[in-house]
Image (spheres, helix red, strand yellow):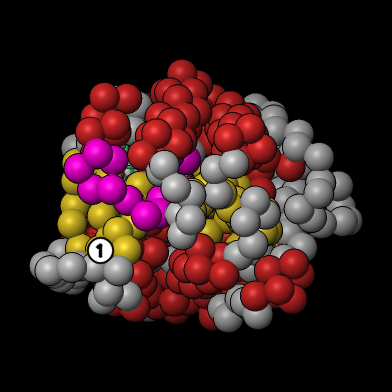
């Protein structure tokens, strides 16, 4: 079969990557989509079982930190584009083990940049897209929003590793002319997220009547973006974004953690048919995360005005859709909470 383009998506078995792979495999039968993933604790091919036998989809298991492997992959597939999502993505893990974040998020990104530079002898029609986070901008006070020109001020090992890789992607653009685009987005939520992040962890715990560990005073603020809205934005930016640019992506959906958790508790009581107030009783204030960023908020007007994107899912509707998905996919939840993850989970929160 011949294809118009071959696109490498890294981290396609993870949370956001799996939604992006599905979207692109279905939307572009003329593109060959190659999903490269190491299948760490966060990668799960179950996320893609519905499209795994499509003719325009291939999966390759491998590590972006392995320079030789990446070089050979580029030689074999002659990619036209790269959408790079593979990363270590959890702030709490980065506090415990920064080095694995340095390796995957920084060295892995440079390996991909070097391979693109080597094999793209002609940059025409090529694009290297780095999927990044709003956490690179640091922490906001009660007011204000991150814009694309906000100075970088990363404060956790995770956000520092993502900031570093953003800088390197831009450096390859300025130094070597590599065609790049970057997006920085807020906290995603929805199906397929590994249950170490706030929402799937709390849904899992409520279901099993376990404590809900709220860090610090619970008044930290995040902007929550429906994951499929994010995948749609990435596709749009990949296809139509301007070369060398950065686009912020946000859900226009800010919540203080404790308000989000209280709303989730109400939704869960209803869905589990438990007396009102049962889930809230599980809330347990615990020691704060070191260096916990107070507030993130995104101004996505550049993306909205230039490319016509807008978020579609907000507030309780998103929480309900998320809770319903995890409750009706309890096998998925059981599978990912057993094995390697279980050891980490037990160390963090006990049995
Ligand atoms: P995730 O942890 O769910 O998935 C990461 C994927 O990368 C997994 O499938 C994992 O197996 C793979 N991976 C990890 N190390 C690898 C390596 N060395 N080689 C190859 N594959 C490897 O992450 P996510 O939440 O889907 O995030 C995807 C991207 O989006 C990341 O770059 C992250 O920084 C960024 N991002 C995430 C959010 C969010 O809220 N989740 C927000 C903004 C930006
Ligand atoms: P998280 O999902 O880890 O995303 P991030 O740190 O990248 O924003 O956390 C979201 C917010 O929820 C953050 O303020 C930390 C807080 N949080 C808790 O209070 N308890 C928890 O068990 C977790 C995982 C997070």
Secondary structure of residue under mark 1: strand
Pick out the residue farthest to the front. 122
Q: In which quarter of the image is residue 299?
A: bottom right
Question: Which residue is at 48% across, 49% downward?
Answer: 123
Q: Position of residue 66 (x, y in %)?
A: 29, 25
Question: Which residue is at 23% across, 33% downward?
Answer: 72
Q: Position of residue 172 (x, y in %)?
A: 58, 35
Tell me the crowding category of disc 1: few under 14, some 14 to 19, or many 20 or more residues within 10 angstroms, Cα based: many
Q: Nearer the viewer, residue 164 or 332?
A: 164
Q: Where is residue 139 in the image (x, y as percent from the top left)?
A: 77, 42
Residue 277 seen in the figure: no
Residue 224 seen in the figure: yes
The N terminus: image quadrant: bottom left
Q: Nearer the viewer, residue 191 or 278?
A: 191
State which region is magenta: 74-89
The C terminus: image quadrant: top left
Q: Position of residue 281 (x, y in %)?
A: 53, 57
Q: Which of 237 and 257 is in front in this view?
A: 237
Q: Is residue 152 magenta?
A: no
Q: Quadrant of residue 328?
A: bottom left
Q: Does the magenta stretch include residue 82?
A: yes
Residue 58 located left or right of residue 299: left
Q: Which residue matches tag 1?
A: 32
């Amino acid at each position: 079969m011949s294809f118009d383009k071959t696109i490498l998506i890294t981290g396609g078995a993870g949370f956001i990557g799996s939604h992006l792979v599905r979207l692109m495999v279905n939307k572009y039968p003329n593109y060959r989509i190659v999903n490269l993933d190491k299948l760490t604790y966060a990668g799960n091919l179950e996320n893609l079982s519905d499209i795994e036998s499509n003719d325009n989809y291939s999966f390759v298991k491998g590590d972006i930190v392995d320079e030789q492997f990446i070089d050979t992959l580029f030689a074999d597939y002659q990619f036209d584009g790269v959408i790079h999502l593979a990363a270590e993505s959890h702030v709490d893990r980065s506090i415990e083990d920064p080095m694995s974040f340095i390796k995957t998020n920084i060295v892995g990104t440079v390996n991909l940049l070097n391979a693109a530079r080597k094999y793209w002898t002609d940059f025409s029609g090529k694009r290297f897209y780095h999927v990044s986070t709003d956490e690179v901008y640091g922490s906001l006070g009660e007011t204000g929003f991150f814009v694309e020109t906000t100075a970088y001020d990363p404060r956790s090992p995770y956000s520092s590793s993502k900031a570093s890789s953003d800088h390197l992607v831009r450096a390859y653009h300025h130094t070597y002319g590599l065609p790049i685009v970057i997006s920085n987005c807020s906290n995603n939520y929805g199906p397929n997220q590994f249950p170490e992040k706030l929402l799937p962890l709390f849904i899992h715990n409520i279901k099993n009547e376990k404590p809900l560990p709220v860090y610090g005073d619970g008044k930290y603020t995040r902007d929550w973006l429906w994951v499929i809205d994010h995948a749609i934005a990435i596709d749009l930016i990949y296809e139509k974004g301007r070369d060398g640019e950065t686009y912020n992506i946000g859900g226009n959906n800010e919540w203080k953690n404790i308000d989000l958790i209280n709303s989730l508790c109400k939704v869960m009581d209803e869905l589990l048919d438990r007396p009102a107030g049962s889930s809230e009783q599980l809330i347990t204030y615990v020691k704060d995360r070191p260096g916990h960023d107070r507030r993130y908020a995104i101004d996505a007007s550049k993306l909205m005005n230039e490319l016509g994107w807008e978020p579609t899912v907000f507030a309780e509707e998103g929480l309900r859709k998320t809770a319903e998905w995890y409750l009706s996919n309890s096998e998925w939840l059981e599978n990912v909470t057993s094995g390697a993850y279980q050891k980490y989970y037990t160390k963090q929160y006990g049995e």
